[in-house]
Image: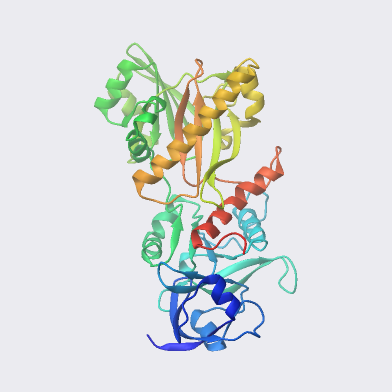
Amino acid sequence: MQTVGELYLNKKTIKRLNVPVSDRVQVRAGANVVNATLVIKNNIPGRFKLSSDLAQALHLNGQELRIRYDHENEIIHIGPLVGILVDYLPNHEEYTPKSVQAEMIYLSTLGRRLPAQFFIFTPGGINWKDHTVKGFTWRNGGLERGRWSGAVYPIPDVIYDRITTRVAQARSKAARRRLMSLPYVHYFNPSFLNKWRVHQLLAQNSELIAYLPETHNLNQENLSDMAAKYKTLYLKPCNGSQGYRIIKVIVNGQNYNYTIYSHGRHSGQAGSITGLLQATRSTRGKRPYIVQQGIDLDTYWGSPFDMRIILQKDGEGQWVISKKFVRIAPSGSSIANLSRGGTAETSARVLAKVLNGNRSLIREKNEELRRLCQTAAETLETNSESCYGELGLDIGIDKKGKLWIIEVNSKPRKTTVTALSQAIVRNTFKRPLLYAIYLSGFKRHG
C-alpha cells in the first residue's frame, strides 16, 4: 500500500494513546485505510493534524473528529463516523411531526450535539470504488437553513439501519449485505423480523417457553390441531406490521367466527377449517402466516390492552427500557395497535388499576417485565447472530396476571411528539446514537 501524506501527533497524544512510534503508520477513517508518515510535532493545534493529501485520501473534509489507537488491529483510527441508512432522503416529503422527515431531522439535530460525525445516507449514495457515501445533515442555520446539506464521507464506522419498509429492505438487500461484509464496519438493526423466525429463536431459551403463546406455521393440519385446543386463535402474516391482515378466530364447536383486520374490520363465519381457510384466502394471498394461541388479555375499562416496550442499548452497550406505555384497543376490537385506532396510556396508571393499587405487586410485575424484555432481547440477538441496538416488544398481561410475549419488532417507529414526556422521546432517539459511538470504539467523552 502506497504511503500518502503525514499524520502529525504531539508527544502527549502519543503517550496518552500508547501509539508505537514508527516512521510509517496505518490510518483509518470509516472503511478507508491508508499508509501515512508519522510526524511528531509539539506545536500543532489540537491533538492531531492530517496533511491535506492524507485528509483527501481518507475522504475527510474538515470534519471535527477524534483520534484513538486501535491496539487490536494496530491502526490509528480517526472518527467516529456514523451513518444512518434510510431508503430515501425525505427532502420533498410534507413535514409533519410524525413523518419520516421529522424523525431524520431530529436524529440529525441530536447528532450534532454528540462527539461524532453523524449523517443520513441511502444505498444509492454509495460509491463502492472509493468506499465513500453521499451523506446528508440537516442545517438549522446559515445559507442552507432548513435544508439537507450533502457532502462526501467515508463509508462510516457504524451504520444504524433505519430502512422504513420491507419492500425497501428487499430492494436494498445486496447493498446492505455488502456493507455488512466490510472490515471495520459495525452494522446494527439489519432487517425487519419474521414472526415465525422470532418464535423459533426465542423458543430455544427454556426460560422463555412459558411466556410464548403456542405458535405454528399456518396450514390446515396445524389450524385444526390448534382449534381443538383453544377457543381463540390469531392468524398473523409472518412479515406483517401495524396489525394489518390479522385474522381473529373464535372457535364455537364446528363453527368458526372470524374477524379480518385489514381496511377496517370484516367479520364472517365458516362451518369448517377448510371453509375458514377459503374464506380468508383473499386476505392472506400467498403470504406465509402463523397460527397463534389467543391470549385472554386483561382489560382496562372494558378494552383489552398490551404494553409496548422500547428496549435500547445505551452508550455502554447495555439494554435499558427507554419507553414503556400501554396500548388500549378501540371499542369492539381486540387489536391494540395505535395505527388501528388504539389509544396510548401510561403503564403506571393501567397497572395501578388492574393490580388494584398493590404497590408490591406492581413493583414485582415491573421487575419481571424488565427481566423478560432483557432476556428476550439477548436471546434474539445471540441466536440470530445479529446486532440490534433497539427492539420494540409487545407484552400482554392475561386476566390471571401472567405476562406473554406477543410480538417483537426490530424497527420500532418513533415519533418526535408525545402527550406524555418529551424527555422520553429525546432518549429514545438519542440512545441508538450513543450506542453507535460505543460500537465505533470511541468513548462518549474524551
Q: Is residue 208 above or below residue 163?
A: above
Q: Is residue 147 above or below residue 26?
A: above
Query: Residue pushed farthest right?
Result: 142
Question: Position of 181 compared to 260: left or right?
Answer: left
Q: Is residue 22 above or below residue 230?
A: below
Residue 386 x, y percent position in the rendering:
39, 51
| Number of numbered discs on residues | 0
Q: Quadrant of residue 130?
A: bottom left
Q: Quadrant of residue 26?
A: bottom left
Q: Residue at x 58, y 80 (%)?
A: 11
Q: Residue at x 32, y 35 (%)?
A: 204
**Quarter in which the C terminus is drawn:** bottom right
Residue 435 x, y percent position in the rendering:
54, 54
Q: Nearer the viewer, residue 185 or 107?
A: 185
- Is residue 348 among the parts visible in the rendering? yes
Q: Nearer the viewer, residue 410 or 318?
A: 318
**Quarter in which the N terminus is drawn:** bottom left
Query: Residue pushed farthest top?
Result: 253
What colour scheme governs how the chains and residues are painted in the rendered image of this protein?
A: rainbow
Residue 409 x, y percent position in the rendering:
47, 42
Q: Residue at x 30, y 19 (%)?
A: 272
Q: Is residue 442 above or below residue 288?
A: below
- Is residue 132 among the parts visible in the rendering? no
